[in-house]
Amino acid sequence: MPQIPPPEPAASAPLELAFDRYEPADQRRRESLFALGNGMLLVRGSPAEGSGAAHYPGTYHAGAYARLRGEAAGEAIDIESLARLPDWTQVRLRIAGAERPLCAEHAQVRDYRQALDVRAGVVRRSLVLVDAEGRRTRLQETRLVSLAQVEIAALCLEVTPLDWSGELEVEVGMDAGVANTLVARDDGYDPRAFELLALEPHAGAQLAHLRTRGIGMEVAIVVRSLLDGGELPADAGRDGDLLRQCLRVPAGAGRGITIARTAAVVAASRGTATVVDAACAALRRAPDFGRLCSAHAAAWTRLWDQVRIDVDGALRCPIAIAQSHLLQTAPPRAHGCDAGVPARGWQEAYHGQIFWDATLSLRGLGLQAPEVVRGGLAYRHRRLDAARDAARAAGHAGAMFPWRSAHGGREVTPRFQRNPVNGRWMPDRTCLQRHVNAAIAYDAWHDVLATGDLAWLADEGAELLVEIARFWASIAEHDAADDRYDIRGVVGPDEYHTLHPVTRRAGVDNNSYTNVMAAWTLRRAGDALDMLAPPARAALARRIGLGADEPARWARIARRLRLVFLDDGVLAPFAGFDRLERMQIEAFERECGGQRIDHVLDARGGDINDFQVLKQADTAMLAYLLPEAELLELVADMGYGLTRAQLRATLRHDFERTLHDSSLSDLVYAGAFTRLDPALSARLFRQALHPDGKAGNHGTEKGLHLGAKGALLDILQRHYLGIRAERAGLCVEPAPPLDLGRVSVPVAYRGCRLRITYEDGDLEIAAAADNRSAVPLSCPGGRGPLAPGGVRRVASAAEPTVRAR
């Protein structure tokens, strides 16, 4: 495939992502970048009048999965995949008598601009089309997915002839002939995601009613179309899977028309009449496009002002865009939507499934919007029984959450992945990444630290922590020879090493990240129980059959879990890593010509498992997630001496062997190296600012990597400004790069609001005047409560570390 020339974003307002050139080869990536959502719905940014293979219109509903079936390696396979829903955005245009439609695919494009307005939460697009006859027509589109009425998405298209008069043919359509073709066929699945129950005119609107295959989720989409503020004639006709209304309208130079389309999308697990009636009712409540915009802008502004991070210079736009995309995807619990935070958003990448890097997505918003974090945890708690069943089926206690999850609580990791180099179906063993359980525990614990919500801890949080602790205690195998515990047959965050280096059985032993985080979880589960009032603890113990001796057993296992060190004191990624062959990574990458190393090795009859090569950060995740002092203390409690110098050497050892085949990898290392190698941290952070920002970026056209966006925000706040919630209070310990500039961060902490501002070594922490109580605070100026309305200023709070090179 030829390389796509990288069109750069246009020079634009500080809080816009904008392009001022139309590039057909880059449209699908941009349609992901300009996707809009409200945590429940997401609509890709494809043009309403566009057609052809350059575009991939997509509407998705959070949690509306289908079960796609197929065949791989001669075996029947299936996967839960987020269903692509009928396309309601179509507005096809043609000048009467013209041979071709009026769109960018069949005309010259001039004066093009498409922009995501972060402040307003809308996308605007304008262009001038010059057809084969030389006639010029201006198109201006505004699109939104409403935060004020979460079932509603809408667009408004203005069509203005600039130098011609005549009739304009307009066709508004609902296309139900869509399928999950962006990813499904490549993975061996039938891409048809739903069966159509109805496609017809309904109450003056267009209706599509469907049921997702295999899962049975019912979805109704009802679309109202207005021409210049008036309803279109009710003469819709069906042509196969396309429901359309066609009409001719007069248009003249400088005198255009306006077409507004408003869609109500409702999904439910059961009830045929319910979803249709609910969608119709939502559409009736929806006002005209102008008032929809106003209501959405008001709701978006309230949310944006709550979370907005102010940053100077080159960081400002990427930080704002990262916040915007996270807010548009993460479902607040208030929505009542049973959905987690998918790895690449509510699109088809990774089939819209939820992985462990939801932790990174949630960390990015956790200091400002704890209700969003709580929504992700609610998704996990609803699947706790399924996780218990999975643990029991595997012979373990407690709850074993799946590596990849979707509609229910079952493991949905594919059994095979296709090697694009030779077409071979490679076994996929990544479901052995049991560390996802520690990630869920991490989210639950830090939610409690940030909110102080002991009621939630008693109702849901402690139950999650306890059941995950039970799992770790169960999976750890005791070795009487040295009174240590081993965790065998797992896959670490690296993902490349899925076979034991000697026996070749599935999984490696004693992955350092897994074992340390298991020990951390076992400790935190005991701490969570200690935080509960005696009646709440007793009630929880009765509900889940908690034995009085269990916390002590967890603590013992946490102290005796095995870690493996290399001869030079470096913490090994896993047992036997030093037996593997060292690879000259740069030379081999050049030889691979941009193809993944594991795929090239497999095509040559080799195996990535045989080499000291990490796909992405592994042990470094420990230094990313845990403050240095906490990590060293935890390892010491496990009976090992790990010094700061050893930790730095461990990160260096792994960094030299890491391919960074994930947009997350550079960011994890950037966070991990913040205080251990500031120059490297700053460089990695800067080069990872735009993970989806280059044309031809692999995977971006299918969805945005939200974990990378969350990590950008997390590094800025938790690593560079050193803001973190602790049991004793709010801690602020800056360690910024020299060229960070001014950063101002809003913080929500246990029902109180603060704003923390850092500039040139000076730190200001201001508490909102209406805070209900003082905030216990630890910063370079010392410890002590910060009263409502109080301000604490610390000159030279931290010496900027080093400029990125």
Image (cartoon, rainbow, N blue to C red):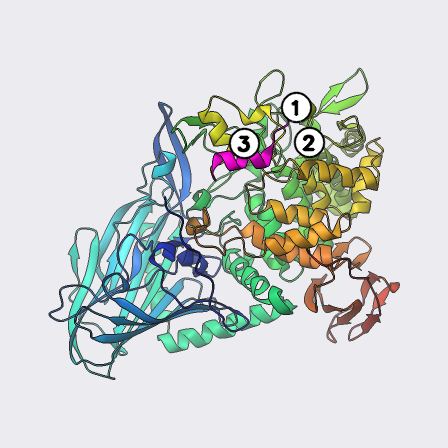
* Percent x, y of residue 154: 36, 67
> Pointer 3: what residue?
430
Q: Which residues are magenta?
A: 580-593
Q: Is residue 709 left or right of residue 647?
A: left
Q: Earlier in the sequence, mark 1 or mark 3?
A: 3
> Pointer 1: what residue?
488
> Pointer 2: what residue?
573
Hey, which residue is sitting farthest left in the picture? 97
Would residue 8 be counted in the magenta stretch?
no
CA distance for labels 1 and 3: 14 Å
Q: Nearer the viewer, residue 142 or 800?
A: 800
Label 2 secondary element: loop
- Count neighbours of disc 2 (C-alpha within 10 A) and say few if under 14, some if 14 to 19, many if 20 or more: many
Q: Nearer the viewer, residue 509 or 544?
A: 509
Amino acid type assigned to the residue bearing label 3 in the image: Thr
Amino acid type assigned to the residue bearing label 2 in the image: Pro
- Count neighbours of disc 1 (C-alpha within 10 A) and say few if under 14, some if 14 to 19, many if 20 or more: some
* Percent x, y of residue 607: 53, 24
Label 3 secondary element: helix
Q: Is residue 782 left or right of residue 210?
A: right
* Relative height, residue 685 to residue 308 (above, below): above
Q: Quadrant of residue 713?
A: bottom right
Amino acid type assigned to the residue bearing label 1 in the image: Arg
Q: Earlier in the sequence, mark 1 or mark 2?
A: 1
* Relative height, residue 332 to residue 74 (above, below): below
